[in-house]
Image (spheres, helix red, strand yellow):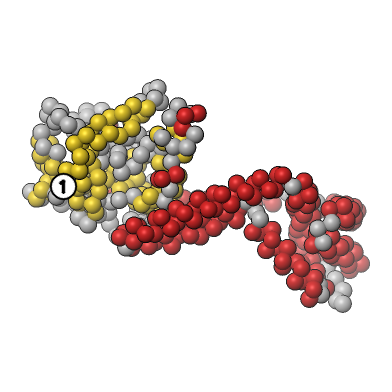
Amino acid sequence: MSTASPSMKLGAAMAARRTPEQLKARRQLMWRELLTSLWAPLCGVGLAFIPYVTLIEMAPGTASWAQPLIKGFGLLMVLAFVGLLVWRNASRKESLLRTLRHEAHELISEDERILARLGAKVSPAVAERITEQALRVESASVAANAELLRTETQALEKLTQEHLGAYRKQSVWDFLGGFGKALLIAVIIRTVLIEPYRIPSGSMLPTLQIGDQVFVNKFIYGVRIPYTNFVPFRIVREPMRGDVIVFNNPVDESKDFIKRVIGIPGDTVEIVDGVVRINGEPQPRTLVTPDYVVHNQDDLTGRWFDQEEVLYRETLGEVVHSSLQHPMRLPGREHEGPYTVPANSVFVMGDNRDNSADSRYNLGGPGGAEVAYVPYGHIKGKAMVVWLSLGWGGLLGNLFGGTGLRVDRFFEPVR
């Protein structure tokens, strides 16, 4: 059996003393804790989500079978989460053990940090006593003996306070270091990888419902430098016709919008009787139904109301999507354009064509009859998939004025 020394980390000293049986029991406990953690179902969904999004982005046709699979898996994980939550709170023994194990783990981790920082300032005898007591705490944890675990943890706490008490107070730098790391990770994820976005209005109906929560691919068009509208280089490709993008409104930079790219640099866009023409070519569309009902929401009162529209299937480039149009053409909208898209910009419209503040109407800014293009630097990313939806007709909607959990929208690809 090796003797602990100040130069040896506490974790390494404990590992050197474990028997094969103790090591096996510890690993079993570790896996049990991981699989019964409330994070386990969430991590399972996250791990499945990455290949799912990659698959439907690279091969959109696979969504027809991939979406039901991941939706079923996601609902299974929701049930697992609820089941774990009920079990963890219903079992007093399990709840107590988890609390005690957490306290023990935090204490051992604290001892390891202090011993590593102090090094030779701690005598070998003190390091030895702390190592021995930490092993007793670990054995009690593995044995699932709550009373013994509490006793051994209290003994380690007393030993720690006696010999390391002067060094236990966390410095401001320690706190800022931990907080800074967490903040840096969050900023990197939101800046480089993905960012959530909530659909606030009906301008993208029926493709995106009010209350849909979508994940936005932040790197496909290039990474914007935080708090600027500058993209130093492209990573995958430039925006294409048919892409649904989230962008910082160049007319009012306090707002983010989500619209569909209709025209790319050099395109001339016109809308004639509701039909999109690009460079003089009408974009194919077919009538689906003349009396399609969507559920919209009043911005002021929050009340839901039915809106009857004409539903079409439209093709833009390689993207086939749905669009809505009023049954009667509104005055002044029989012919809109032509609009010629400048370099490094896109022309965008909402799929709810007659209820959208888009490029045709100055993106909702003053002087609504003016055209407004979206510069590349303002584009935050491409909408990929609906990961959550709280909208009309969802579960428990009768309790919340019609707004409920839309299970049918889970993992819906944004097309």
Q: Is mark 1 on a helix, strand or loop?
A: strand
> Label 1: which residue?
285
Q: Can you tell which quarter of the image residue 348 is in?
A: top left
Instruction: Tell me the residue at 80%/73% (across/down).
Output: 21
Count the marks: how many?
1
The answer to whether any part of residue 15 appears in the image is no
Q: What's the residue at 62%, 49% (across, down)? A: 83
Task: Say which quadrant the N terminus sits in.
Answer: bottom right
Q: Who is closer to the viewer here, 260 or 140? A: 140
Identify which residue is drawn at 34% across, 42% down. Answer: 208
- x and y, in percent, of residue 367 in the image: 22, 28
35 left or right, relative to 259? right
In percent of width and height, residue 69 lies at 43, 58
- As shown in the figure, which amino acid type bears the numbered disc 1? Arg
In the image, taking residue 149 as reference, residue 278 lies left or right, namely left
Few, some or many C-alpha atoms within 10 Å of disc 1 (few <14, some 14-19, many ≥20)?
some
**Residue situated in front as seen by the camera: 406 or 356:** 406
Q: Is 236 on the left-hand or right-hand side of 161?
A: left
Q: Position of residue 337 (x, y in %)?
A: 12, 39
Name above or below for residue 194 compared with residue 10: above
**Residue 36: where, in percent of width, then height?**
66, 55
Q: Residue at x 43, y 41 (%)?
A: 406
Q: In this view, does 393 lie above or below 97?
A: above
Is residue 3 visible from the viewing direction of this image?
yes
